[in-house]
Image (spheres, rainbow, N blue to C red):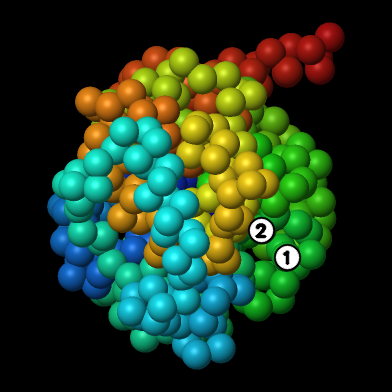
């Protein structure tokens, strides 16, 4: 599985694993891939703790971080908004709707709440602080998940010898990233979990590869096994960016009720919905997404107002899901269409080894076919 990207990162395999769980990140890097920690919502202090732990676990193996700095969001013209200002912009109608939705599903307002990890207002100085903490560590990669990385992020990455990546759902966006100076473009297809565009992976990858050559491209969206890795590389990608497949691993922190839902879901059980973040993000369909799709109910607010609105209600759902049928009906999480193949719980190492072996088997089979 030799590619330019593998050489750039110094990993055994060009398999990148995005996860909010530090255990998954460390386990993937230890298994020969590149774990990438999603750090949206972290405080600098929390990130310091997480990255210190990862580095203690993986030694000199490569890993990275993924931050979310959108190209467009409410408050961008003011350098981002703090929680207080965000709360002032949230209509009472939306709060009443969510209070009613949770009451309808038997979730008490007295349910225990957990404090959020950090602000979601994308305040510029806080984002800089977060990136600076990352650059104080041995990261090999920093990626921006939604839009082109800010100029200062690219400049700091190159100063520190850290590769800078950006996700793209269109060839036009990928071209903008390359012109801005990123080192790697992640072409993410419609099938992916989380924020996605509307172009399928099979179509998107060769378009992006042609648009940004010679900048290397990682394929993302619907990739969870070795056959799909072989397909991605045959389309011109230099590696794969995976996420959903790690959500049912032994190491994952996925909510137990959600994990069980994933294990029984089909590829038709996901939906692109603005109900969690304010931007279209693929997630498991549930009573939550159904309620927000109902035209009689309020429409989701733009990012980051929707995230600010829903976070405390979401924690009530999570804290009740193990004991409440209503909360179980509502709870979900971001996941791609590959969820239909996520049918068992395995270790991260087992998933990586199976991917690699299936890739080898696939390439050997294609070689036999090609040679007649």
The percent coordinates of residue 89 (x first, y second) are 47, 76
Q: Name the residue carrying label 2.
A: 168
Quarter of the image where the N terminus is located: top right
Q: Which mark is residue 85?
A: none
Q: Is residue 219 above or below residue 49?
A: above
Taking the spot 81% from the left edge, 51% from the top edge, the residue there is 207
Tell me, yes or no, whether the two marked residues, 1 and 2, touch with CB atoms within 8 Å: yes
Taking the spot 73% from the left edge, 18% from the top edge, the residue there is 366
Q: Nearer the viewer, residue 243 or 119?
A: 119
Q: Earlier in the sequence, mark 1 or mark 2?
A: 2
The percent coordinates of residue 304 (x first, y second) are 48, 68
Give SS at disc 2.
strand
The percent coordinates of residue 282 (x first, y second) are 58, 42
How busy is the neighbourhood of tag 1: few (under 14 within 10 Å), some, or many (20 plus)? Answer: some
Alpha carbon distance from label 1 to label 2: 6 Å
The residue most toward the top is: 372
Residue 219 lies left or right of residue 250; in this view the side is: right
Taking the spot 39% from the left edge, 73% from the top edge, the residue there is 87
Q: Name the residue carrying label 1.
A: 173
Q: Quadrant of residue 267?
A: top right
Q: Is residue 310 visible?
A: yes
């Amino acid at each position: 599985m030799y590619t330019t990207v593998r050489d750039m990162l110094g990993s055994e395999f060009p398999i990148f694993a995005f996860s909010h769980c530090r255990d998954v990140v460390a386990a993937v890097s230890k298994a020969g891939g590149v774990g990438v920690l999603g750090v949206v919502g972290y405080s600098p202090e929390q990130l310091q703790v997480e990255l210190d732990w990862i580095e203690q676990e993986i030694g000199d193996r490569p890993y990275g971080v993924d931050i979310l700095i959108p190209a467009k969001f409410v408050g961008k013209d003011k350098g981002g908004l703090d929680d207080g200002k965000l709360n002032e912009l949230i209509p009472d109608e939306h709060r009443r709707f969510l209070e009613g939705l949770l009451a309808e599903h038997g979730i008490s307002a007295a349910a225990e709440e957990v404090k959020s990890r950090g602000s979601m207002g994308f305040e510029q100085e806080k984002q800089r602080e977060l990136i600076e903490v990352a650059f104080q560590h041995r990261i090999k990669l920093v990626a921006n998940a939604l839009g082109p990385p800010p100029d200062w992020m690219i400049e700091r990455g190159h100063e520190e010898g850290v590769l800078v990546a950006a996700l793209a759902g269109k060839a036009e966006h990928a071209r903008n990233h390359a012109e801005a100076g990123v080192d790697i473009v992640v072409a993410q297809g419609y099938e992916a979990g989380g924020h996605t565009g509307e172009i399928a992976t099979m179509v998107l990858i060769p378009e992006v590869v042609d648009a940004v050559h010679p900048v290397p491209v990682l394929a993302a969206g619907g990739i969870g096994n070795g056959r799909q890795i072989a397909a991605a590389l045959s389309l011109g990608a230099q590696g794969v960016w995976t996420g959903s497949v790690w959500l049912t691993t032994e190491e994952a922190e996925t909510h137990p009720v959600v994990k069980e839902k994933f294990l029984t879901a089909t590829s038709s059980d996901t939906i692109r919905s603005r109900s969690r973040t304010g931007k279209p993000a693929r997630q498991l369909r549930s009573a939550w997404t159904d309620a927000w799709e109902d035209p009689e109910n309020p429409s989701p607010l733009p990012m980051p107002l929707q995230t600010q609105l829903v976070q405390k209600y979401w924690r009530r759902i999570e804290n009740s899901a193990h004991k409440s049928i209503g909360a179980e009906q509502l709870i979900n999480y971001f996941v791609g269409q590959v969820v239909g193949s996520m049918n068992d719980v395995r270790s991260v190492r087992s998933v990586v080894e199976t991917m690699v072996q299936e890739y080898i088997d696939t390439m050997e089979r294609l070689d036999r076919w090609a040679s007649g």
